[in-house]
Image (cartoon, grey):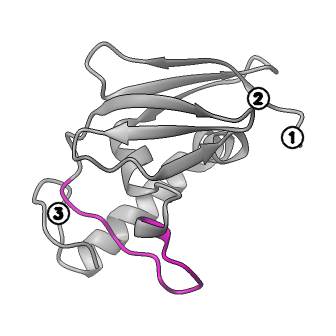
Amino acid sequence: MSDLWPTELRVSKDRQRLLVTFNDNQSFDLSAELLRVLSPSAEVQGHGPGQKVTVPGKRNVAIISMIPTGNYAVRIGFDDLHDTGIFTWSYLRELGEKGAELFADYERDLAEKGMSRDMSEKPR
């Protein structure tokens, strides 16, 4: 088990951001869009290598629920009804540390596929 765990998970009033503070006092402000499009769910990540999909149209997605999953994760529900992603503490930390880079990769994928952060369509 990781030596890092959140001491606070706080959703912003507009439900567009999640503030995560870890026991080493590092804090990360994660957008709901980042969490949604990089969800660890099989729906987004696939069931094996090369199966990850790019999810468009989530610029304004909001967090509607957070359900603890054991002592190691939280299940985050979004207002587009996606709620199958179980975010482990280590994955939330990775998103905090590498989120800008991962989101830039996501935006490149969108552009390469002719997709948009604003227009919802079938993920591919």
Determine contact: label 2, label 1, CB under 8 Å: yes
Dot 1 or dot 3: first in sequence order is 1
Q: Residue at x 18, y 73 (%)?
A: 122
Please state the horizontal and vertical placement of residue 85, each as a whole percent of the image.
48, 51
| Residue where numbered disc 1 is placed | 2
Q: Is residue 80 above or below residue 29?
A: below
Kindly identify which residue carries mark 2.
5
Asked whether 92 or 104 is in front, the reply is 92
Q: Which residues are magenta?
A: 44-57
* Image coords of residue 59 (percent x, y): 22, 46
Amino acid carrying mark 3 in the image: Ser
Disc 3, SS: loop
Does 23 appear above or below 53? above
Front of the two marks 1 and 3? 1
Magenta stretch encompasses residue 14: no
Give the secondary structure at mark 2.
Answer: loop
User: What residue does disc 3 label?
Assistant: 116
Amino acid at dot 2: Trp
Residue found 51% across the figure and 40% down from its top? 75
Marks 2 and 3, how far apart in space?
34 Å
- Work out which quarter of the rendered image holds the C terminus and state it: bottom left
